[in-house]
Image (cartoon, rainbow, N blue to C red):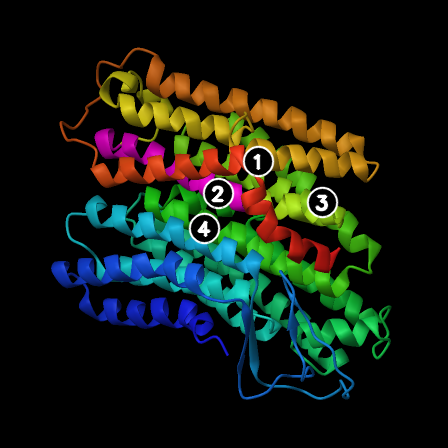
Amino acid sequence: MNYLIPLMVVIPITCALFLNLLHERTRTVKAISIIVALALPTVPLIANYGVQYFGGYPPLAQNPTIAVGLPTLITGTALNIFHPAITYVFGSAQKLMIVILGFIALFAIYISLYEVKKASGVYAYLMLMGTASIIAMLLSDDIFNLYVFFEIAALAQVGIVLVSKVDYNYETALKYMILGSIASPLLLIGIALLLGVTGNVNITDIVYSIQHGLVNPQSPVLLMACSLIIFGWLYGTGLPPFHTIKSAMYSKALPTGAALLQAFSVFSFVAIGIIILRIFSYLPFAHIFIIGISLVAMTLGITMAITQTDFKRLIAYLAVGELGYIGIGLGLGTALGITAGLFQAVNEAVITAFLFIGFGTIMYKTKETDMRKLGGMLVETPKSALLVLLAGLAMAGVPPFNAFQSKLMLVQASLNSGLPEIAIIMVLLSIVTFMTFMRAFHTIYLRPKPADLEIKNEKIPNITLVAMVAFLVVCLVFGLFPQIATNFLQGMAMSIA
């Protein structure tokens, strides 16, 4: 047993609950927040790979063997037995994604301590609860446990928006909750149908049942379960038709909150998408649908970004569009495609956090997000301007940054799968992303400063610049040495393909 595995979830949840009681006791909130934030990337970094069972059983596998990615469980016991215990699986792919999520949360929490006049225990509580929930989703090999944390993460995201004190944030949060009251029950019904057909909620057991003919893979109930789970996946990650409300959530949060919300969406996308592939990979329409909705997300996200005058909404729609690249990799279903999709997920989480925090310096200096009222910020914030420019180039897939490598792998995977049209679309949309970003950069930083623009005579906190430099380092390291990331991800990809 590796007891560090459950601690990845237990530590942030326990400390979050404690912080919620402190409210605005500034020094205590800051001290606890800093310690827990440091633990978020550190614990998964030092933890050994393994499987952790809650409830005292290995479900069907008395002999689990851990490969580099997900476990292969071998058993000869009967499958139609309900196993109530929860299983967490920690492999190399989970390690990389949880470390990156913890890295983003670390800086989001640190910056938030300087972003508000009084450190808020409630804000820290919501950030830690959301982070813990996504970590649990990445670890869980139990689909009902994943659903529980999916709901907690959704509520944490609503809370982050509510405490941000941005205009119309209550309206946006309410709309998101109303849509969630429809999508989440449908996801739960899909899980219930899986339980009814297979007798299990353990994902590995469900896969075993289907692959070994103990369940009819063409059962209409399974097909319905697949459809309902995919619908819940669309809601949780912000894919169409939920792209508008998801981008609004990003725009109504503080920059640190928006950075975390997007990371939550990216890794939720991966956690549920991998489950869909594991359970329903034998269904051709599942792959076709994932590729189709990903192309729609890419096109809609970038198209709507072009029309935005608010830079937070612009980044939000670009972020939604970038999710499509991840979906293309997963939808292709090949080892190269899935590896590229997972690599793109890691890259997107880092780059989008980089952009949200970078553009957050404009809000810090001007309290303005309308690009029509901005200009001349290069003179006011030259260091952050350079870093924001590099972040935008990274998102567009310009070498030598990390997204260039993952998008190049996606192009290669599309060509290898006999789908050159998808490769061409991805290249063209990357060019449009570059042009859209450069237009926004010119508007905010390069054109003359409007006469009525008021700029605070306050220095940007050093921690914000440190965070941006740290994100830049990750972008460059993964861009120059992509094998550092892909070596962690290939095992999971090969086990699914």
The answer to which quarter of the image holds residue 399 is top right
Residue 240 placement, left or right of 289: left
- Is label 2 in contact with label 1 (beta carbons under 8 Å)? yes
Crowding near pointer 1: few (<14 within 10 Å), some, many (20+)?
Answer: many
* Numbered label attached to residue 301: 1
- Rendered view: 168 above or below 44: above
Residue 271 placement, left or right of 336: left
Q: Tell me which segment is drawn in magenta.
A: 346-367
Say which of 415 and 298 sits in front.
Answer: 415
Residue 367's x, y, as percent? 25, 33
Q: Is residue 252 magenta?
A: no
What residue sits right under mark 4 in the picture? Answer: 100
Residue 126 placement, left or right of 292: left
Closer to the chain start, of discs 3 and 1, is 1
Q: Is residue 359 magenta?
A: yes
Closer to the chain start, of discs 3 and 4, is 4
